[in-house]
């Protein structure tokens, strides 16, 4: 029979898993809700093939927005998942930090829907959903970094240590993502059309990261 140490509750591991399962469910629901507003074109007896293709073509902004948000949510989930690989204990503050991480995630379906309904509209009002979407991403990155800091820095006794290279990559990617979306947001107040130039630092970072990873010697898995 498995023995438990005196300072460890018998259900401690299970409770940590419950937090992870709950979080995974939130991410999964957010991903699913992205498609709720993505309704198929209505087909009648009078509908021609040309009409149908025209309606499908008009959905390009919706499709692009959904794919973009899907990729972003998956990216945040991967970060969240990699953190829980190290967590073996928790306290109230860690639970709160985790909930703060999930808060921006549940808003992605709303900000995504708001965004694709405004794409193609050429007036000042279209900038509002665009900026809300950017704020959503900034908050997602900041809250994820806060959760990382809580479990790996402030309450490091609650988790197994992370490899230095992994820790550096984790921090760097989150900081550069949040900073890039913040830069896009700030530039949007000057020029919405030029605002995407704010993503250049993120692109440069990804190129440098991939280049340095290729130059690293591969670890021998069978060693």
Image (cartoon, rainbow, N blue to C red):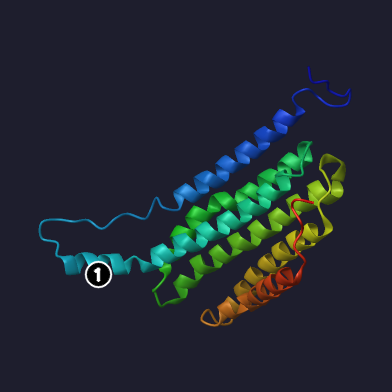
- The residue labelled by disc 1 is 54
Q: What residue is rendered at 64% in x and 57% in y? A: 140
Q: What residue is rendered at 29% in x and 55% in y? A: 40
Q: Report x, y in % for residue 150.
A: 80, 48
Q: Is residue 2 above or below residue 80?
A: above
Q: Report x, y in % for residue 5.
A: 87, 24
Q: In this view, does 157 lie above or below 201?
A: above
Q: What residue is rendered at 41% in x and 52% in y? A: 35
Residue 189 visible in the current orientation: no
Residue 10 visible in the current orientation: yes
Q: Report x, y in % for residue 67.
A: 47, 61
Does residue 10 appear left or right of residue 79 in this picture?
right
Within 10 Å of the Cα at label 1, are there few (<14), some (14-19), or many (20+) other Cα atoms? few
Q: Label 1's element?
A: helix
Q: For residue 10, what is the image quadrant? A: top right
Q: For residue 217, what is the image quadrant? A: bottom right
**Pick the front one: 115 or 155:** 155
Q: What residue is rendered at 72% in x and 68% in y? A: 213
């Amino acid at each position: 029979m498995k023995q438990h140490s005196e300072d460890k509750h018998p259900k401690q591991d299970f409770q940590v898993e419950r937090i992870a399962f709950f979080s995974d469910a939130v991410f999964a629901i957010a991903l699913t809700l992205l498609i709720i507003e993505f309704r198929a074109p209505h087909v009648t007896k009078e509908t021609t093939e040309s009409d149908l293709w025209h309606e499908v073509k008009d959905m390009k902004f919706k499709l692009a927005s959904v794919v973009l948000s899907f990729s972003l949510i998956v990216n945040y989930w991967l970060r969240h998942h990699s953190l829980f690989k190290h967590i073996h204990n928790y306290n109230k503050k860690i639970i709160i930090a985790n909930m703060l991480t999930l808060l921006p995630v549940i808003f992605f379906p709303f900000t995504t829907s708001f965004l694709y309904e405004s794409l193609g509209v050429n007036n000042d009002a279209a900038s509002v959903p665009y900026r809300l979407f950017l704020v959503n991403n900034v908050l997602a990155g900041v809250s994820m970094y806060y959760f990382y800091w809580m479990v790996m820095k402030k309450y490091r006794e609650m988790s197994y240590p992370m490899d230095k290279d992994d820790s550096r990559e984790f921090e760097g990617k989150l900081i550069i993502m949040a900073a890039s979306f913040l830069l896009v947001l700030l530039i949007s107040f000057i020029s919405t059309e030029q605002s995407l130039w704010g993503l250049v630092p993120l692109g440069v970072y990804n190129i440098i990261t991939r280049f340095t990873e290729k130059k690293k010697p591969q670890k021998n898995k069978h060693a």
